[in-house]
Image (spheres, rainbow, N blue to C red):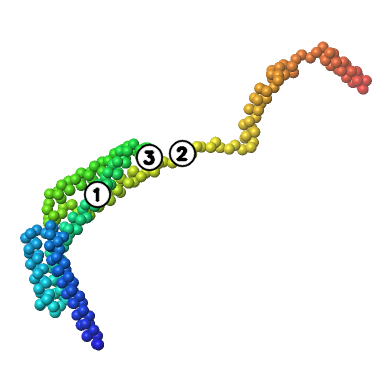
Amino acid sequence: MSAEDLQKAVEKEFEMALQDRVMEETKEKKNALYDKYQEFVMPSEKDELITKLQEVEDWLYEEGEDETKGVYVAKLEELQKQGNPIEMRYKEWTERGPAINQLAYCIHSFREAALSKDPKFDHIDVAEKQKVVSECSESEAWLREKQQQQDALPKYANPVLLSADIKRKAEALDRFCKPIMTRPRPVPAKPQTPPTAAPGEQSQAHEPQNQERMHQESPWPMRTVMHRLRRPQSQWTRTNQRLYLQHKNIGTMLLI
């Protein structure tokens, strides 16, 4: 098989795959309009879309059996343009409820923690807790307003409350409140230990205390001891001193 024939065979197989895809989407959307999409499409829109799908299905079995790739792609895009808004409404309806519940849970949890008297939140400043309460109230008011607007619309109308917006609101609330309410308790300061003195300083520091202790523990008061040291010499001691001086003077005279 030449390269040209191989290329033609590949393109033919691709066209057949596109034809099958268009046929599959046509049948799927047509059945869905009578089933899960029934409430999400207006009656006039529904009749128009069913007519269009039937025309495409008839074309596939007749003229469209041997069409080119470009024709199949154009038909597929046309079907998606008409069917995607209906699918979006259905998808939003199924995802909106869980998203609302998640946001409501975040609001309730953070507000309850901020207003709690639990000791584990005592270290968080009251002003910071009030910021959390205010942020929760703002998110709650936004959700309430959007829900009222959405509930007033029929299911076949384009929604004003998108699940993606609800999720972004919950993420923003979490980013604001979580760092405040999960702030760790400050670590208590360690008691300061007195500086250790050098051995010489320790002995000098204890010396006055030792002297005072010796004074207190001495059997006689220090003033009594000093009084005895300063007591006048006795008469006998003075006589001995005079004799010693006389002998000293006699020895000096003999040497001369």
Could you say which disc has been placed on residue 120 in the image?
Answer: 3
Q: Is residue 33 above or below residue 150?
A: below
Quickly name the residue at label 2.
Answer: 189
Q: Is residue 249 above or below residue 66?
A: above
Tell me the amino acid under the disc marked 2: Ala
Find residue 147 and report its horizontal and vertical position in percent: 17, 48
Mark nearest the camera among 1 and 3 is 1
Give the left or right position of residue 157, taking residue 219 as reference: left
Q: Is residue 188 above or below residue 16?
A: above
Q: What's the distance in space between the residues labelled 2 and 1, CA to CA?
A: 43 Å
Find residue 22 and report its horizontal and vertical position in percent: 16, 71
Mark nearest the camera among 2 and 1 is 1
Give the left or right position of residue 32, taking residue 222 as reference: left
> Does the rendering let one see residue 232?
yes
Say few, some or many: other residues with alpha carbon within 10 Å of mark 3 (under 14 / 14 to 19 / 20 or more): few
Mark nearest the camera among 2 and 3 is 3
Residue most extreme to the bottom = 1
Q: Quadrant of residue 136?
A: top left
Q: Quadrant of residue 249?
A: top right
For the residues labelled 2 and 1, say whether their Cβ atoms are less than 8 Å apart. Answer: no
Q: Nearer the viewer, residue 43 or 218?
A: 43
Find residue 60 and report its horizontal and vertical position in percent: 12, 75
Q: What residue lies at 64% left-to-right and 33% top-to-bottom? A: 203
Quickly name the residue at label 1.
Answer: 101
Under tag 1, what secondary structure? helix
Tell me the amino acid under the disc marked 3: Lys
Tell me the amino acid under the disc marked 1: Asn
Under tag 3, what secondary structure? helix
Say few, some or many: other residues with alpha carbon within 10 Å of mark 2 (under 14 / 14 to 19 / 20 or more): few
Give the left or right position of residue 41, taking residue 14 as reference: left
Which mark is first along the chain, 3 or 2? 3
